[in-house]
Amino acid sequence: MTKILLRNVIEADLPILFEQQIDPKAVAMAAFPSKDRGPFMLHWEKIMKDKHVITKAIIYKGKLAGHIVCWKEKYEQQVGYWLGQSFWGRGIASSALAEFVNEVKIRPLYAHVANRNIASRRVLEKCGFTMHDEGREESILKLSA
Ligand SMILES: CC(C)(COP(=O)(O)OP(=O)(O)OC[C@H]1O[C@@H](n2cnc3c(N)ncnc32)[C@H](O)[C@@H]1OP(=O)(O)O)[C@@H](O)C(=O)NCCC(=O)NCCS
């Protein structure tokens, strides 16, 4: 297991998280649109104050590698994660999500993932998520227990 640390996201993290989420390669991988700086900062200021949203920074070797966010949408409790490109391929997301689902016991937990995002799908499977709803472009995986 790659050694990581999770802590709450703080305001000082936001400029780095912003750069990570506008990376075109990451956007293409996740098939999730990026936000411009203004809307990004507003969105994060809002969710960081919301006690129903869990925002965790992923720390690897003392650096902010990315984040995990968990929120309720309609009836689903969802989880999502995002790493800076320089941190990909080292087992960080797998370790971070495993640690997160160990800490946060809300179940079921759902994750929406683009079908072409093989790495993300693998991260979910390694953490015990299974296929819930397979769509043409995007699927929903679920962690039940
Ligand atoms: C998807 C993402 C979180 C993966 O993070 P990561 O730390 O590189 O993932 P890990 O190193 O833990 O690897 C997880 C698995 O995917 C595999 N993998 C990693 N990159 C891969 C790639 N480009 N293609 C195929 N498989 C890949 C790994 O081999 C590993 O599987 P294994 O343990 O069976 O060998 C990261 O690439 C990212 O943040 N991408 C942009 C945002 C995004 O897609 N977020 C998820 C939205 S649902």
Image (cartoon, rainbow, N blue to C red):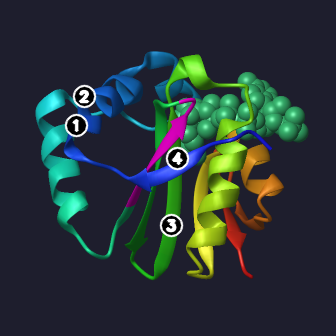
Closer to us: 129 or 5: 5
Closer to us: 8 or 20: 8
Query: Where in the figure is residue 82, as x and y percent of width and height?
Result: 50, 39
**Which residue, given by chain and number where applicable, does mark 3 sit on?**
78
Which residues make up the magenta segment? 55-61
Quarter containing the C terminus:
bottom right
What is the spatial separation of the Cα atoms under label 2 and label 1, in whole angstroms? 7 Å
**Which residue, given by chain and number where applicable, does mark 2 sit on?**
15
Question: Mark 2, mark 1: which one is toward the viewer?
Answer: 1
Q: Is residue 117 visible?
A: no
How many tags in the picture? 4
**Which residue, given by chain and number where applicable, does mark 4 sit on?**
81
Q: Are marks 1 and 3 in contact (CB under 8 Å)?
A: no
What type of secondary structure mainly makes up the magenta span?
A: strand
Quarter containing the N terminus:
top right
Q: Residues within 10 Å of mark 3 (few under 14, many from 20)?
A: many
Q: Quadrant of residue 21?
A: top left
**Which residue, given by chain and number where applicable, does mark 1 sit on?**
12
Q: Residues within 10 Å of mark 4 (few under 14, many from 20)?
A: some
Q: Tag 3, which secondary structure?
A: strand
Q: Earlier in the sequence, mark 4 or mark 2?
A: 2
Q: Earlier in the sequence, mark 3 or mark 2?
A: 2
